[in-house]
């Protein structure tokens, strides 16, 4: 069984408020978008979702929309080796910093699920991910 980093259903099944289900895809979808933008997805993922990837890169579809259209499961088999190594370092819920950076970047009030799926918000968190990726690369030289 493939390693699963996250599933949208983990989040929308536990919504405390009457939020749209699509909000469960935003935080992980931004990270997946960054991985797509930086060519860290697997060949199989590229072949299976070629049109979605092209739409993302042309800003016709956001990372959270890609995440939703691909089933709402973020798993190891979606990524290439570098993508997996970085995801294990940065995204892992137990040891990674992504969720803390996300909370800090967006001042998540009243919750992490209230951040809107916009290109402006993606660009904002992208800067945080870029910085962490630079740090990770320097650390692993």
Image (cartoon, rainbow, N blue to C red):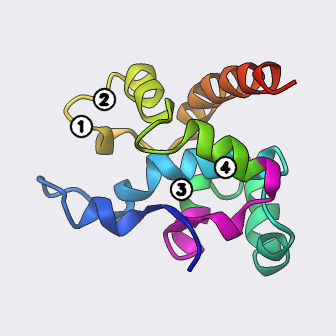
Quick one: SS at disc 1?
A: loop
Residue 101 drawn above or below residue 13: above
Residues under numbered marks 1 and 2 in contact, where contact means CB atoms less than 8 Å apart: yes
Residue 45: percent from left, percent from top: 77, 72
Span of residues in magenta: 66-82
Q: Residue at the location (52% across, 76% down)?
A: 71
Quick one: SS at disc 2?
A: loop
**Whole-number angstrom distance, CA of label 2 to CA of label 4:** 20 Å
Residue at which label 4 appears: 33
Residue at which label 1 appears: 111
N-terminal of the two: label 1 or label 4? Answer: 4
Quick one: SS at disc 4?
A: helix
**Whole-number angstrom distance, CA of label 1 to CA of label 2:** 5 Å
Q: Residue at the location (50% across, 35% down)?
A: 96
Camera-side residue of 117 and 50: 50
**Whole-number angstrom distance, CA of label 3 to CA of label 1:** 17 Å
In the picture, measured across the screen, residue 41 lies left or right of residue 2, that is right
Residue 89: percent from left, percent from top: 61, 38
Residue 6: percent from left, percent from top: 46, 59
Residues under numbered marks 3 and 4 in contact, where contact means CB atoms less than 8 Å apart: yes
Residue at which label 3 appears: 64
N-terminal of the two: label 3 or label 2? Answer: 3
**Whole-number angstrom distance, CA of label 3 to CA of label 4:** 7 Å
In the picture, measured across the screen, residue 16 lies left or right of residue 134, that is left
N-terminal of the two: label 3 or label 4? Answer: 4
In the picture, measured across the screen, residue 24 lies left or right of residue 78, that is left
């Amino acid at each position: 069984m493939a390693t699963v980093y996250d599933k949208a259903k983990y989040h929308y099944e536990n919504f405390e408020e009457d939020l749209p289900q699509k909000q469960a895809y935003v935080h992980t979808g931004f990270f997946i978008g960054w991985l797509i933008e930086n060519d860290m997805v697997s060949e199989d993922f590229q072949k299976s979702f070629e049109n979605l990837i092209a739409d993302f890169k042309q800003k016709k579809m956001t990372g959270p929309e890609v995440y939703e259209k691909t089933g709402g499961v973020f798993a190891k088999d979606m990524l290439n080796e570098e993508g997996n190594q970085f995801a294990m370092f940065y995204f892992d819920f137990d040891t990674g910093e992504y969720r803390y950076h996300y909370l800090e970047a967006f001042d998540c009030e009243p919750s992490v699920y209230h951040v809107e799926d916009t290109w402006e918000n993606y660009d904002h968190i992208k800067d945080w991910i870029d910085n962490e990726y630079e740090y990770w690369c320097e650390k692993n030289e």
